[in-house]
Structures are given as C-alpha cells and as structure tokens.
Amino acid sequence: MPGPASQPKVRVVTFRVDDQDLSAREDETLIEVCREHRIPIPSLCYLEGLSAWGGCRLCMVEIVGQPRLAAACSTRVVEGMEVHTDTERLRRYRRTLVELLFAERAHVCSVCVSNGHCELQTLAQRCGVDHMRMPRRAVSYPVDSSHEMFRVDHDRCILCTRCVRVCDEIEGAHTWDVMGRGSDCRVITDMAQPWAESETCTSCGKCVQVCPTGALVKQGTSVGEMVKDQHFLPILARRRHPR
Amino acid sequence: MSATPKLKVATAWLDGCSGCHMSLLDMDQRLIELSERIDIVYSPLVDAKVLPERVDVGILEGSISNADDLALARRFRAHCRVLVSLGDCAVNGNVPAMRNHFPLEQVLARAYRENVTLQPQLPERGVPALRQRVVPIHGEVTVDVFVPGCPPSAEAIWQVLVALLEGRDPDPSAFTRFGA
C-alpha cells in the first residue's frame, strides 16, 4: 500500500466544552467539533460545506478568561481552552437574536411554504421564543417570481448569505450577492436584476435548498410544502477539499 | 370529586378565526376531565354575557385590530389573575397583522370600494372602528403566558391548562411553535 499523500503536519489539541474533555485537530472550528460530538449549538448562517460567515451570531459561546463572546463557527480550537455553550447569558442573547430576526421582516409561519421545515421556526421553538418583546416592523419587501423554477421572497430572508456562498463556492456562478445597508440590505441576483434575466444563474437550485427559511423556494409550492434537501452540500464540499 | 375549588376560566376571541377555540374543543375526552377541574365562566362557548369580577385564567385568541378588541383585552387584564395569549394572532399578529403593510385607508378602500360593484361604502354603524395598526395582545396589555401555534394543538392547550391548574409555570415551547 502506498503511504498517505503528504499532508502538512496538523497538531491535535485538547480542550473542554461544557465540562467534557475533547480533542481535535487545531485547524478545526469549535462548531465543527461540537457538531461532531453532538453538543447542540444553534446557528443559521453556518452550514457544513460552506465557508464560515459569522453573521447570525447564534453560535456564540463563552470562552473562560475572555470577556467577549466568540462565534463558534469562526473560532479555532486552542490547546487548553474552556468553552461553555449553554449558559443563561447565552440563552438570553440567543432568544433576543431570534426575536429580532422575527421582528425585522414579515415572518408569518402559518402561511409560509416552509412552515414545519424552517430552521428559523425550529430554532425559535428550541430557544423558547414564544413571542416577540419588541414591536414588529411592517415594511414590505419585494417578491421576485420572475424565474420559471424558483422564487425569492425578501420578507422571509434573514440575510444569512448561505445562497451567496453556495452559488459562489459550490456552483461557481456567483449569481447571488448582497446589496444595501441596514434594514435595506437584501440579496440580489447579478446586478439587482430580475432573477429571470440573470445571465450567470445556472438554475441549479442549490441556493433554494440551503436557504434556512421560506425566502428561496421552488415555484408552485404551497403552505408547508417546501421541504429542503441539503444532502448534496457536504458530499460536494468534501470531494472538492479533501481533509 | 376533588375538594379543591374549580379554576375560573374566561375565553374570548378578538381578531382571529376561532380556530384556537376549535382546537380547545378538540381535546376529546379530556374535556370531561377538564370540566371537573375548571369552570368556564365567560366565553363564546358558553351563555354567560358578563365577565365576572374575579377570574383565575383569561384566554385570548386573536390580535387587537379594532376598538372593541382593545376594550375587551383591557377588561380581561383587569379581571383575570393570569392572562394567556392563545395562538399566533394573539402572540405575534399573524395573518391579521399582514394588513400593517398598508395604510388603513388603503385597506378599507380595497375591501369596501375597489372590489364592490353595488353601492360602495364604508361600514360605520354597528361595527367597531378599525385601528391603524394590528398589534398582538401584549402590544397593549401585559400577558403572562404565550401559546404560539396556528392553531396551538389541543395537546399544547391541555398542557398549559394542566400546568396552571397545578400552579406550575407552563412551558409552551415544549409543545408548540409559531405556525404549528
């Protein structure tokens, strides 16, 4: 048998997560290790197979000795670090983050195509969000139904940028990008043209499958019918970048 | 029969579809057990026309969309020891609040003028005035328990009522969610 292909030497480090002694390669992130060991950490922008974005802040953890919270998706494991993933402070922040996401745009689960298959909805339940303490904004965002197969409803978008990353990193088309600032921020196809007029879109549908909510869906789906299938992503990602 | 006094429960629906009340009735045989432990003293489901002075648990379905909704929500708050927001409309506005995306004048014009072929006019007599914005119950009065769901399942309502009967803090998220 030929020996394994030469790989740069990667050290293994040991650390503690929620009083569990763990070890991992030093190039792994906290969220990867936690997912591997079935330590639940909520996240919306992080998705295995895509680069880390660190935008949703739901995967924040406490690292002993550091006053600042750290996003588990963009924090590498370090020898001797001690991490807490489920403290009262973290639970409070996560609840507030989810409430703010719901309050920002018109997330009406009962009439959403993704009802019952939505990561935001599931996360709200898991975090114990049973109402929003702040008044909800009532600003309408556009819906683009121009594409013959897919639809984007910006009212249901949480700006996780999974669509942007999967289109760029996996499909290689970079049809999606982000435009505007603050509450005007939205994902766009090409130069903010109608999706149907995009010259780069290959209609592969990867953006639809990785979208955590009902923002990107297949045309023709009705309430609760949009079930997403993300199996392709870790498979494709692993084949491209062998560890 | 237990010696403990029955819990006095009042219910009402504001701007909702009555689906949450239907879900309450969907408890099947547990309704009999419930009837041995609670008295429904005021509700669309019973004949009583007056909200009693002291009520243990008030349950409100629907959001606050018009003047009558607001008045009833305030009366419930004043008379009920524990106030429960039942269902997504009560908890977060849900479908009724979708009109918040448009000015009230535009909503009324759409419903009563643009789509009407005969004598288009705004209803004014005998109907409460719509408010500019639809708000969830806790947008106007303090709410103690939130039970999301569209509608919350009979199981979720049962679990909340049992917790209140036993003097525990209900944990609705264990049984229901937005849109459930």
Image: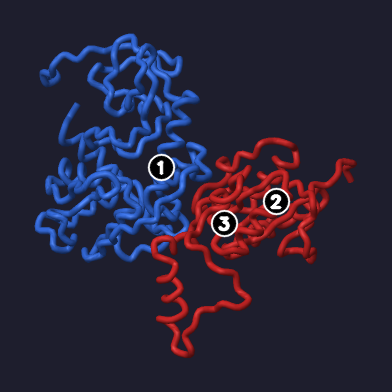
Chain colours: A blue, B red
Crowding at dot 1, Cα within 10 Å, few <14 / some 14-19 / many 20+, comes out as some
Q: Position of residue B95 (x, y in %)?
A: 48, 61
Secondary element under disc 2, as helix, strand or loop, is: strand
Task: Give the residue at mark 3.
Answer: B151
Q: Position of residue A197 (x, y in %)?
A: 13, 63
Image quarter in which the C terminus of chain A is found: top left
B131 relative to B31, above or below: below
Marks 2 and 1 sit apart, C-alpha to C-alpha, by: 28 Å
B83 relative to B97, above or below: above
Q: Residue at x 51, y 55 (%)?
A: B135
Task: Give the residue at mark 1.
Answer: A100
In this view, the residue in front, B43 or A172, is B43
Camera-near label (3 vs 1) is: 1
B31 relative to A4, above or below: below
Q: Which residue type does callout 1 highlight?
A: Leu
Image quarter in which the N terminus of chain A is found: top left
Q: Chain of mark 2?
A: B
Q: Residue at x 42, y 26 (%)?
A: A39
Asked whether residue A199 is in view, the answer is yes
Marks 3 and 2 sit apart, C-alpha to C-alpha, by: 17 Å
Secondary element under disc 1, as helix, strand or loop, is: helix
Q: Residue at x 46, y 44 (%)?
A: A134
Task: Give the residue at mark 2.
Answer: B58
Secondary element under disc 3, as helix, strand or loop, is: loop
In this view, the residue in front, B79 or B87, is B79
Q: Which residue type does callout 3 highlight?
A: Pro
